Amino acid sequence: MLGFRVCKRKQAVSADWVEKFRTLPVANVSDVMSRMTAGGAPLRPFYTGPRMVGAAVTVKARPGDNLMVHKALDIAEPGDIVVVDAGGDLSNAIIGELMVAHAAQRGLGGIVIFGAIRDSEELLEGSFPVFAAGVTHRGPYKDGPGEVNVPIAINGMVIEPGDLICGDADGLLSVPLASAETVFEAASKKHAAETKQMENIKLGKNDRAWVDASLERLGCVIED
């Protein structure tokens, strides 16, 4: 029934691409995607650990209800990221430390909640990747409706089941499955260029001529 269904994911980004993207800062990936895609500033990490990267298992949940999130955690494969569109509502927590412990025991790669979580202190002290938009002590309902492995959108960022999800301290990003190779190649070049630039800055060799050139091109008047 539309609005209350669990679908089978038909494809997913490969483990090879997941490991390759794990070497790249999210900011570099965002830059080469023209800075047009983002999960939004409210989505922040609630864990202490390395970058989160994996294939998406998507959930469209009724705000404040986590029945379908439980199902997604049960069918997701090791390394997968369960991404939940709970409408951004912060009235009720969608997950807490018990569900995170279950996800970690199953070897999942992380959980993203466009909504609230609870047990934030415990999650912040842990290493299992969790991103969320807020915190509340009020727990969830388990009545549905909801859908698993359907297209969702978070702050305008469309996520298809199997897309690549990456997140770090700067935020969350989804890379379309079909674009993973192109985005990785461009982001790798961007990262290499910035690494070289950082080396030059430390050596006092940073070229700043582009600043005045840009100001001149824009017609800026610089007084002596």
Image (cartoon, grey):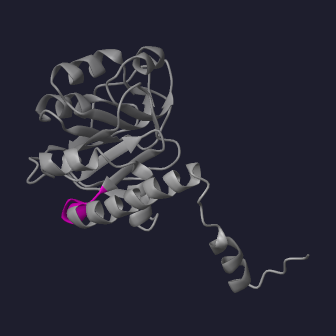
Any part of residue 179 in sight? yes
Left or right of 88 on screen, residue 212? right
Q: Residue at x 42, y 61 (%)?
A: 193
Residue 86 is situated, as x and y percent measured from the top left of the image, at 38, 40
- Residue range of the region highlighted in magenta in the rendering: 175-180
Q: Nearer the viewer, residue 172 or 2?
A: 172
Residue 15 drawn in magenta: no
Q: Residue at x 45, y 65 (%)?
A: 36
Q: Is residue 43 above or below residue 13?
A: above
Q: Main secondary structure of the magenta part?
A: helix
Q: Nearer the viewer, residue 161 or 192?
A: 192
Residue 131 is situated, as x and y percent measured from the top left of the image, at 40, 35
Residue 127 is situated, as x and y percent measured from the top left of the image, at 34, 22
Q: Nearer the viewer, residue 49 or 8?
A: 49
Q: Residue at x 19, y 65 (%)?
A: 178
Q: Residue at x 33, y 46 (%)?
A: 166
Q: Is residue 5 above or below residue 96?
A: below
